[in-house]
Amino acid sequence: MLAPDSAKGTRGAARGGLANMAGSALAGGVGVVVTWIVARRLGQAEAGAFFSATAAFVLAGGLAKLGTGTGLVYWPARLRTTGGSHLLGACLRTGLVPVVGLSLVLAAVLGFAAPNDTLRTLAFLLPLQVLTDTLLTATRGYRSMRPTVLVDRVLRNVLQLLAVGAAALWFASLPGFALAWALPYLPAAVLAGLALRRIYLAGRPPGATSRRAERRALRRDFWLFTGPRAVAAVAQLALQRVDVLLVAALGGLGAAAVYAVAGRFVILIQFANQGISQSVQPRLAEALSTGDRVTANRLYQVATGWLVLVTWPICLLVILFAPAYLRLFGDAYTAGTPVVRLLAVAMLVATGCGMVDMVLAMAGRTSVNLGNVLVALAVTIGLDVLLIPRWGALGAAAGLAGAMLANNLLPLVQVYRGARLHPFGPGTRAAALLAIGCFGLLPRAVTALAGDGPAGLALAVAVATPAFAAGAWLLRDRLELGAFTRRNPQEAS
């Protein structure tokens, strides 16, 4: 039986996570469709140039955010839990002002030094991307997932799809695609600012004041905590994006396009991870800040079970359907089949560890977290440089897979040794066995009998899906799926 506070936190995480996962599914789907439009409308070389430019744009944004993706969740959650609500305004200013300033500087530098019009167009819109992400991060520090879901997951992605679709019809140039892809950050930034203002004013204690010494101490502690995350966040983004740039540099733009298309499903998995972890993050920070490791471990294990339940079927289906999936983007992209399968196996391991990187950070171990990310980055760059000239896109996939293993297994050991937290609860084990049985073993048995052509694959999915749904229903108590339906009117979502 769960303790009342633990059950309450699980219900809140479930409701926030469900909404965010739904929005993340939309965002991931839009990402795949946008990739398809770019790959089909542009040649491989131009598509590779587009993916390389957007990778550089995202990397620059990660640098400008200075690690506040963790600090602006951890510190508001901690202040509200430990009686420091009068410092919330100072906390937000501490995190937001340097980020805005640095984003403007980087935009100017990138715009001046950009080697082409595509990257120059994206540089102009860089501050809007940074501002949108940072403002929405701060709203999550108040346990509010609605702005993230509505503004970023839904509105921005729908506008991006419409804009890129229009660009494909009317002005299919690289700068035109770049402008269409990034311009939706303008309304998103405005709405994110309005959402944070409303949430802050609603939660500000009446007559709240703070002393200068308190604000000075908060700024010091905020950046001592967040500083390592600033480097780690850039390294984490580099793990996701630098491989595309290295493939373009070492293997050519055509290989970069194949690799970007083949690895697009990884972003879909990452969105699902974010959908759950962003809802759990403030609750986990509150539990760890008060020393409640029982609740923290429960949240970690239950959330990992949900993550495995959602993502492992996708990974296993991607392994099964890899050639058909890639053929949607054009016959030339089927060369990426080994890339898809290798990355899918690595994602099974990564998601099985849960949001371990975030758990380590919420436990206050941001310096250790930084070391892990730098090790993972060294692994991916080292393997990329060694293998891309020989294997092209598959070499980059090997580098990313190695980085995934390092960036999940290292913190897994550290979280257990330092805080006695681990993700392998009954829900995680049940979800893993259910996914492997229904989407790993069962489809293999069906295709062995019916063949692995379109009819055989369709039959395999038709058999696996209801079996998985029935299994999830029978295991609903162990998976704690009831948390998605039970309601507590006193708990904020």
Image (tube, rainbow, N blue to C red):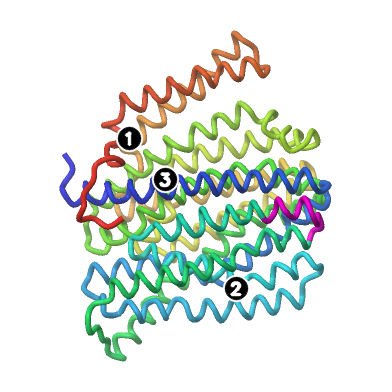
In the displayed structure image, the side of residue 37 where residue 151 appears, left or right: left
Query: In this figure, which residue is indicated by the disc labeled 3?
Result: 354
The Cα atoms of the two marked residues, 1 and 2, are separated by 41 Å
Q: Is residue 456 above or below residue 173?
A: above
Q: Nearer the viewer, residue 107 or 34?
A: 34
Q: Amino acid at mark 1?
A: Gly
Give the extent of the magenta segment. 163-174
Q: Amino acid at mark 3?
A: Gly
In this rendering, which labeled residue sits more in front, label 1 or label 2? Answer: 2
Q: At which x and y percent is residue 227?
A: 47, 73
In this rendering, which labeled residue sits more in front, label 2 or label 3? Answer: 2
Q: At which x and y percent is residue 351?
A: 47, 42
Query: Which type of secondary structure does the marked residue at label 2 adopt?
Result: helix
In the displayed structure image, the side of residue 47 where residue 183 appears, left or right: left
Query: In this figure, which residue is indicated by the disc labeled 2?
Result: 127
Q: Quadrant of the N terminus?
A: top left
Instruction: Point out the tag, 3 or 1, that comes first from the N-terminus.
Output: 3
* 354 is within the stretch colored magenta: no
Q: At which x and y percent is residue 256?
A: 76, 49
Q: Quadrant of the C terminus?
A: bottom left
Q: Which mark is residue 427?
A: 1
* 173 is within the stretch colored magenta: yes
Q: Main secondary structure of the magenta part?
A: helix
> Visible in this render: residue 409?
no
Q: Which mark is residue 254?
A: none
